[in-house]
Image (cartoon, helix red, strand yellow):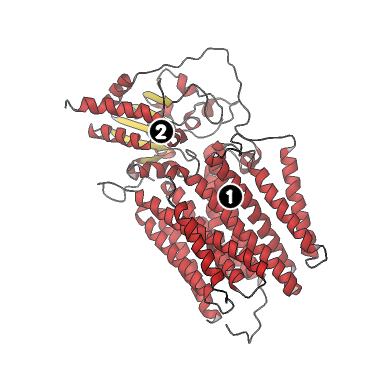
Amino acid sequence: MSHAVVQLAYILSTALFIFALHWMNTPATARKGVYAGVAAMVVAVAVTWAQPEVVNHAWIIFPILAGFAVGIPLARVPLTAVPQRTALSHAFGGLAAGLVGTAKYYLWLSEGPENLTAFRMIAIIVEIILGYLTFTGSLMAAGKLQEVKWVPQRPVTYPLQNVINLALLGIAVALGIALTLHPAADWAPRLFPAIIALALLFGVLLIIPIGGADMPTVIAILNSYAGLSAVAMGFVLDNKLLITAGALDGSSGLILAIIMCKAMNRSFANVLFGAFGQVQQAQLTGEAKVYKAESIEGAAQVLEQANLVVVIPGYGMAVAQAQHRVRELYDQLKKRGITVKFAIHPVAGRMPGHMNVLLAEADIPYTDLVEMDAINPDMPQCDVALVVGANDVVNPAARTDKTSPIYGMPIIDADKARTVFAIKRSKNPGFAGIDNELYFSDRTWMLFGDAKNVIGELVKQLSGGSGMH
Amino acid sequence: MTPEAAPPAVDFWSMLFVFVLASFIGLGVIRRVSRLLHTPLMSITNAISAIAVVGSIIVAGADYPFRIRVLGAIALFASMTNIVSGFLITDRMLKMFKTERKPAGGEPS
């Protein structure tokens, strides 16, 4: 196969990848995007495999079969587990980049050190540092999301944390510069693993100070790193398909990370180095705050009288597996001609867009899933705001309390609704450890209990009543 | 590929060009992706960045020393896992987005 054919095939793949992402702009065409992506990948794999230098076909067939064997079960995880699956696949992406960079370095070192030009060495060093730190960092993130026992859930901090972390990265970069200057020196083959080790360690240390509430941003940043490590691989291998596809992934992660940061009114640096959620706000205002509890019967009656009900879901809904009960409630209310909308905060859930997927799985039409900015102007007309497992994203302290760690974060204006029902498992503060003023507002009534049970009871009340109509 | 002509010297600048332009295309395209679909977007870009498979195939399949090929084979396995699970789960999630008896195209902005 001539060079020209390979390059043409790669250009075709690139174009298909761009279309794949373009078609993601609306749910109506999104599945076409998947097919375009698959087609692009098949073309790229087939053309590469057909290159004459590829001679050990068994070495390709078996890893591919193994990839199917692991990949298919990974695609069938429950949708609540999609964040950890995504983190795991960033880990795989980083690992692949790191391994190919390592392989290429040792190959060139033994078979032709003249290939190790300064430019290639820089690309290899970037590839392995990014690849291996993404590998361990994403594994840590996946472990935190999966709540693996030995991975601490709460942020772990120690004195001089950021200084130590950055120093480690600095050492890795310095060693990389030394290698770039003397890629074939006697000590070079032994220095290379040291850089790998530092990158692996840095990946772990980068993620342990980060709390669950920041996971959407962190996953997006790791997504970007995985893409950039593929770009670096493209520079190493002189392959423009890798560069373009990696750049698409890198820019996607970057945009998502920016959206997440804006939705929390925080900077990248603050997310990565701020150890959010670590500081428990032991802020005693002196006044005894009291919750007003409401009974299921009372809440059902109020819901029945409403014209517009806005449900505000949060990660707690996913934890309680309440989304199917929410759907039943949605059906009951819809049957009465009540308008029901879902207000989706960009950082609700554990990864960008998580709530939309969970609600879509529960068969709620996506036309009723409304973004924060679109729903907020309607909140004063909202008769009932039903908060299901959300906390920080409806906390009015973000607007008013300058001392609050979430001050300045855009929120869903649940407090502007005529009535607020908040479902809460216990009287403890949420994930970020921040007290929520919304619960003490005179318009708010609490429904204490597990979200799944509470909504199930509401549905039972409403369906019992509807038999009379 | 006939090796009669030496491969052209690696052109750093044209690669950098491609990278910068591809990033701009990426930013332009991704910005218009519906916010509803950010989770599927992330899983499809996972699969797309597993294009590292192309590098892994060469490293695993060429006539290189054994230990080099082992690294390539592990990388190939990792990339292939991402391709398979990435595309499958994206499609699985996208199938769930329905409008339900409503005229299509009423997607909230």
In the image as oriented, which residue stretches furthest toward the top?
A287
* Mark positioned earlier in the residue sequence (2 or 1): 1
Q: Chain of mark 1?
A: A
Identify which residue, A286 or A350, lies in the foreground: A350
> Percent position (x, y) of residue B57?
56, 69
A40 to the left or right of A129: left
A194 and A215: which one is in front? A194
Type of amino acid at the residue the image marks with label 2: Ile
Q: CA separation, marks 2 and 1?
A: 28 Å
Estimate how packed mark 1 is, as few (under 14), some (14 to 19) or many (20 or more) residues with alpha carbons within 10 Å: many
Q: In this rendering, would A307 be left or right of A435? A: left
What amino acid does circle 1 point to? Leu
Q: Position of residue A318 (x, y in %)?
A: 43, 37
Q: Are marks 2 and 1 on the same chain?
A: yes
Mark yes or no: residue B32 visible: no
One can see residue B9 in this view: yes
Question: Vertical placement of B58 versus A83: above or below?
Answer: below
Q: Against A104, is A429 above or below?
A: above
Residue name at image x 53 percent, y 41 percent:
A146
Q: Which mark is residue A312?
A: 2
From the top left corner, tell me how far across and down residue A377 is, in percent.
Answer: 39, 34
Displayed quadrant of residue B9:
bottom right
> Looking at the image, which residue is at 54% across and 57% down?
A249
- Is A454 placed above or below B9 here? above
- Residue name at image x 45 percent, y 66 percent: A16
Q: Which residue is mark 1?
A: A222
* Element under disc 2: strand
Whole-percent x, y for residue A370 in the image: 38, 40
Disc 2: host chain:
A
For marks 2 and 1, give the one nearer the viewer: 1
